[in-house]
Image (tube, rainbow, N blue to C red):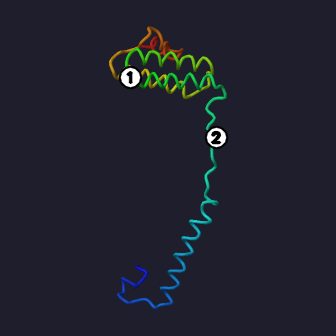
């Protein structure tokens, strides 16, 4: 259905109907542009990943080196990620960066930079013993 006429019946609408529809669409616009942002505003989530600035700085250094994508730089990045994890063991971004660095090594075909750096936990040992 259009604003100017009723397309189904082919009959033009009266000026009163057109005015009502324009008023209705204007009301809807007014609602969504003025009122809705306050009604539907999402609560802002504070992004406090870690309270320790040392861990954050080490994470940034690790990210800087790991994204250079050369073998020595990725190794440097991994060591910085490990230091960030040691500084704050609950810092999830450091773990994510470490995983991304190991992924970059695997994609490039360089393997693990340090033997035993990814030692399996108890679950890994039990799974091997079961096989």
Residue 16 image point, x, y percent: 51, 90
Query: Quarter holding the C terminus?
Result: top left
Residue occupying the far left of the picture: 109
Identify the secondary structure beneath mark 1: loop
Residue at the outermost top position:
115
Q: Position of residue 57 (x, y in %)?
A: 58, 24
Q: Which residue shows up at 48% across the image and 85% down it?
A: 18
Residue 109 in which image quadrant? top left
Is 115 drawn above or below residue 67 in the view shown?
A: above
Residue nearer the viewer, 53 or 17: 53
Query: Is 27 located above or below residue 84 in the figure?
Result: below
Tell me the quadrant of the picture where the N terminus can be found: bottom left
- Secondary structure of the residue carrying numbered label 2: loop
Badge 2 is on which residue?
Answer: 46
Residue at the far right in the pictured view: 51
Q: Nearer the viewer, mark 1 or mark 2?
A: 1
Q: Position of residue 85 (x, y in %)?
A: 58, 20
Q: Are marks 1 and 2 in contact (CB under 8 Å)?
A: no
Q: Which residue is mark 1?
A: 69
Query: How many C-alpha atoms fall within 10 Å of the one at disc 2: few (<14), some, or many (≥20)?
Result: few
Q: Earlier in the sequence, mark 1 or mark 2?
A: 2
Q: Residue at x 52, y 18 (%)?
A: 80
The residue at the point 60 percent across, 66 percent down is 34
Residue 113 found in image quarter: top left
The image shows residue 39, relative to residue 29, as above or below, that is above
Left or right of 54? Residue 5 is: left
């Amino acid at each position: 259905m259009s604003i100017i006429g009723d397309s189904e019946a082919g009959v033009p609408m009266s000026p009163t109907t057109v005015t009502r529809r324009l008023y209705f669409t204007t009301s809807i616009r007014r609602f969504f542009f003025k009122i809705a942002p306050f009604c539907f505003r999402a609560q802002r989530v504070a992004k406090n990943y870690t309270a320790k600035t040392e861990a954050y700085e080490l994470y940034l250094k690790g990210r800087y080196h790991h994204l250079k994508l050369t073998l020595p730089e990725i190794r440097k990045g991994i060591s910085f990620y490990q230091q960030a994890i040691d500084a704050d063991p609950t810092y999830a971004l450091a773990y994510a960066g470490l995983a991304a660095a190991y992924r970059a090594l695997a994609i490039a075909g360089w393997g693990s930079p340090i033997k035993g750096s990814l030692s399996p936990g108890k679950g890994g040992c039990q799974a091997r013993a079961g096989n």
